[in-house]
Image: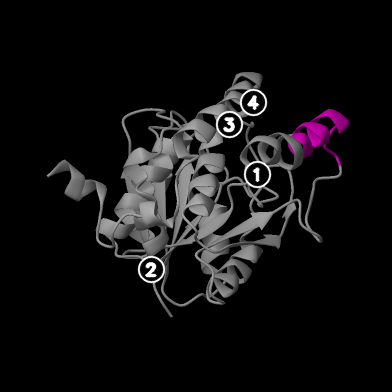
Amino acid sequence: MPGTLVVLPTYNEKENLEPMVTALFALNIDDLSVLVVDDNSPDGTGQIADMLAERHAGHVHVMHRAGKGGLGKAYIAGYQYAMDELDADYIIQMDADFSHQPKYVPQLIDALEHGYDMVLGSRYVPGGGVEETWSPYRKLLSWFANRVWVYLFLRMPVKDATGGFRIWRKETLIGLGLDQIRSNGYVFQVEMAYLCWKLGYRITEIPIHFPDRREGQSKMGMDIQIEAALGVFRLLRQYRQFTPANRRESGYSLQQQAQ
């Protein structure tokens, strides 16, 4: 089985990180490893990550970033490290707070191996859903963002474009050209999915149940929601003319760009 790496961006996730890593390894997936990308969490998450790296030598890796630089930049850094340093074939992105449940990881891998280039864990395909305790406003906002707003302007046939539980082929991430990704907040998820679709990669969604995070507080504020809504217009301008001919060549990386 190809090497599979889970990228976990963290900021103040000390209650969740060790249980998440334990749950991932309990899946008994061959050649599975974890990369924690910590943004200098003041609660000590980075130190817990280092402890886990010592305990699971060669299977847990840690990137320490200087500060809270944003979700998009954390993922981009994690993707590049996964490809350039760890030579991962399949790269999974997920939150460390258990809103993305580890039990779905084998299904993501299985779907990717059925010929897709990116697979998304979706709340809005048949069989998917969100926590019943969500307020009507929160449910409406999430549904409207994905099923109305994003589709209205981008016409992308992805039902959960803001969802962040995904698996990528290494070749797909290379083909996207990560240096041209501009989003850093939650619209980052939309940008990655939109560019993937515009470049002609094969995308599918599998149903997931999306519960509330186990511990800690959500980082999703109204300012982030507004940024994500307005960011759709930039994506439309930036990628409207893209086709599969705009894919980057295999072997391209940000390290090569910097040379």
Query: Does 18 sit left or right of 133 as displayed?
Result: left
Residue to which mark 1 is pinned: 155
N-terminal of the two: label 2 or label 3? 2
Judge depth for marks 2 and 1 and give the one in front: 1
Residue to which mark 3 is pinned: 232
Distance between the Cα atoms at labels 3 and 1?
Answer: 11 Å
Question: Range of the magenta residues?
Answer: 133-144
- Residue 20 image offset from top left, x and y in percent: 56, 55
Pick the quarter of the image with the N terminus. Answer: bottom left
N-terminal of the two: label 2 or label 1? 2
Q: Nearer the viewer, residue 196 or 132?
A: 196
Kind of residue indicated by mark 2:
Asp
- Residue 8 image offset from top left, x and y in percent: 47, 49
Residue to which mark 2 is pinned: 89
Q: Secondary structure at mark 4?
A: helix
Q: Nearer the viewer, residue 144 or 4?
A: 144
Query: Does 230 sit left or right of 255 as displayed?
Result: right
Q: Nearer the viewer, residue 19 or 127?
A: 127
